Image (spheres, rainbow, N blue to C red):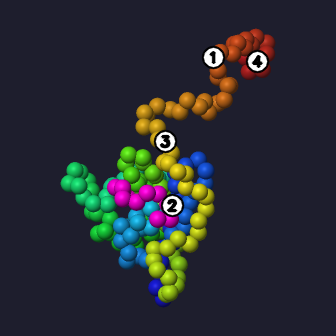
Amino acid sequence: MSTALKLRVILDVKEDVFRDIEIKPEQNLEELHHCIVKVFAIGAGEMASFYKSDKEWSQGDEIPFMDMGISKEVLTEMRNLQAGNILSSSSPNLIYVYDFLNMWTFYVEFISEVEVELDDEYPRCTFNYGTTPESAPEKDFSGKAPKANIFGDAFNDDDEEEHYDDDDNPWA
């Protein structure tokens, strides 16, 4: 019995947009790259990289489409790494960035191993949820916290200050 890796590929947008993709362990990451571009219907022909990631989605070592000779930290090119050697239950996550000008960002998560259906071509999309937006969502690279206040108006300086007497404090 031959198996395939079942992956969930999640687009980093506010709405839920994801695809389940199956790929044979011996297929390379370049084949996964082309499948992601196709099933999310984003314009082909841009540069991309996978990044190794831990369970908290921290970005690790880069796996580029092709080695441009810029960085010494590059593991190897996508075409030289088999999916089964990089994704497993013990190493379940990759981050995929497509089109470095627009920064389409995806989270690739190993789900399980499934039985291969002999008459199908791999990689293949087995589940499709949500609609890909027409353009990549904007990213905030400023390093500043978002303007939204997680505490709502609880600590809004514009409100009048409340004063309490020690008589109101049961622990005083």
Circle 4 sits on which residue?
169
> Who is closer to the viewer here, 43 or 72?
43
Mark in the foreground, 4 or 3: 3
Of marks 3 and 1, which one's residue comes earlier in the chain? 3
Residue 51 is at least partly visible in this image: no
- The picture places residue 104, in percent across and down from the top left corner, at 45, 51
- Write the start and end of the magenta stretch as one range: 38-52
Residue that label 1 marks: 157
Which secondary structure lies at badge 4? loop
Residue marked by disc 3: 138
Instruction: Quickly name the residue at label 2.
Output: 40
x, y percent for residue 156 = 64, 21
> In the rendered structure, which amino acid carries the disc numbered 3?
Glu
Q: Tell me the CA gap for discs 2 and 1.
A: 45 Å
Kindly report which numbered mark, 3 or 1, lies closer to the viewer in this rendering: 3
| Residue at mark 2 to residue at mark 3: CA–CA distance | 17 Å
Q: Sequence order check: which comes first, mark 1 or mark 4?
A: 1
10 Å crowding of disc 2: few (<14), some (14-19), many (20+)? some
Mark 2 near mark 1, Cβ–Cβ under 8 Å?
no
Q: Earlier in the sequence, mark 4 or mark 2?
A: 2
Say which quarter of the image contains residue 81. bottom left
**Residue 20 belongs to the span the image colors magenta:** no
**Dot 1 amino acid type:** Asp
- Quadrant where the C terminus lies? top right
Could you give the CA–CA distance between mark 4 and mark 3, rounded to whole angstroms? 48 Å
